[in-house]
């Protein structure tokens, strides 16, 4: 006698298969690691990486808000109290929140450890408060294992160049480890790459990547900024900027 299996399944069998499938899917979802864009705190707290001031350039900082208004002052988007803020880019971008201001122009300056200007430019400010991005041109390359000081300066009065508001910080260009390079090459999505860079505390490149992904990944953008005490800027718009008037050429290589 040949026994044949019925091609039809009973309603109970269908129900059991559905329960098993849902349970299996839930197990897969639970087993996937959660995406985290939190920037780890500095293992060695140092001097603040972002300092702000206003008033007379080079003089006492008795009044920070000279020509800006609003509850949020001029702010550099960098981790607080982090002595070494890094990038793996030769031409990184710098992000600064500029509140509503009567100033029409700003200046951006990068100097090397010897105090020599590597890059300097003047540009028109947008007419609204927001996060302004300034990038180094391709001809200006930060050198590996070298530290630089940068300043974003709001020129409050064209007739009084000493009247300014500014923020400044330090940046060091570093290199990727072979392990991280391999992980980045294997990462399928830009968000995965940003997460890897964040875990390695490569701030500037993490921020640059998340700025590009912000529209489609607002939750992760907020998570990143909140992790470095910049939660007040999570909804600030990224403004279009800047048409620059360069004041100096790249420092010649000896």
Image: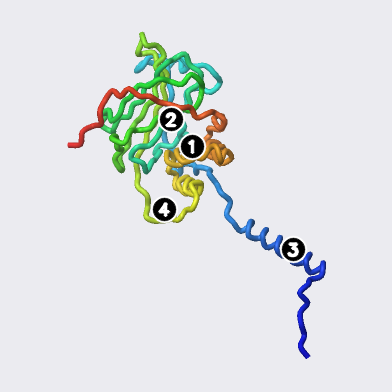
Q: Is residue 216 above or below residue 238?
A: below
User: How far apart are the alpha carbons under marks 4 and 1?
Assistant: 21 Å
Residue 195 position, x and y percent, is 50, 47
Give whichever of discs 2 and 1 has the lower sequence position.
Answer: 2
Q: Is residue 152 left or right of residue 14?
A: left
Q: Is residue 59 above or below residue 14?
A: above
| Mark 1 Cα shell of 10 Å, populated few (<14), some (14-19), many (≥20) | some
Q: Quadrant of residue 220?
A: top right
User: How far apart are the alpha carbons under marks 2 and 1?
Assistant: 10 Å
Q: Is residue 175 left or right of residue 41?
A: left
Q: Which mark is residue 211?
A: 1
| Mark 3 Cα shell of 10 Å, populated few (<14), some (14-19), many (≥20) | few
Residue in the foreground of this view, choosing between 104 and 30: 104
Q: Which mark is residue 133?
A: 2
Q: Is residue 176 above or below residue 134?
A: below
Figure disc tally: 4
The residue identified by callout 4 is 180
Secondary element type, mark 1: helix
Give whichever of discs 3 and 4 has the lower sequence position.
Answer: 3
Residue in the foreground of this view, choosing between 92 and 84: 92
Give whichever of discs 4 and 1 has the lower sequence position.
Answer: 4
Residue farthest to the right, as pictured:
11
Residue at 42% in and 41% down: 205
| Mark 2 Cα shell of 10 Å, populated few (<14), some (14-19), many (≥20) | some
The residue identified by callout 3 is 18
Residue 81 position, x and y percent, is 45, 34
Secondary element type, mark 3: helix
């Amino acid at each position: 006698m040949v026994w044949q299996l019925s091609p039809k399944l009973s309603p109970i069998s269908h129900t059991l298969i559905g329960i098993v499938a849902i349970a299996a899917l839930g197990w897969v979802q639970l087993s996937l690691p959660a995406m985290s864009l939190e920037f780890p705190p500095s293992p060695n707290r140092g001097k603040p990486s972002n300092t702000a001031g206003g008033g007379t350039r080079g003089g006492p900082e008795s009044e920070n808000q000279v020509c800006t208004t609003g509850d949020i002052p001029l702010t550099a988007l960098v981790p607080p109290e982090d002595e070494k803020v890094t990038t793996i880019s030769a031409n990184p971008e710098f992000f600064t929140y500029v509140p509503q201001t009567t100033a029409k122009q700003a200046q951006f300056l990068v100097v090397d450890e010897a105090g020599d200007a590597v890059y300097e430019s003047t540009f028109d400010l947008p007419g609204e408060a927001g996060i302004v991005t300034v990038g180094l041109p391709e001809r200006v390359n930060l050198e590996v294992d070298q530290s630089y000081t940068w300043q974003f300066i709001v020129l409050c009065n064209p007739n009084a160049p000493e009247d300014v508001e500014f923020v400044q910080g330090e940046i060091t260009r570093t290199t990727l480890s072979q392990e991280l390079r391999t992980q980045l090459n294997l990462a399928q999505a830009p968000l995965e790459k940003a997460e890897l860079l964040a875990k390695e505390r490569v701030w500037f490149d993490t921020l640059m990547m998340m700025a590009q992904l912000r529209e489609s990944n607002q939750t992760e953008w907020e998570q990143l900024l909140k992790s470095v005490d910049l939660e007040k800027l999570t909804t600030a718009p990224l403004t279009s900027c800047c048409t620059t008037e360069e004041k100096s050429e790249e420092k010649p290589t000896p």
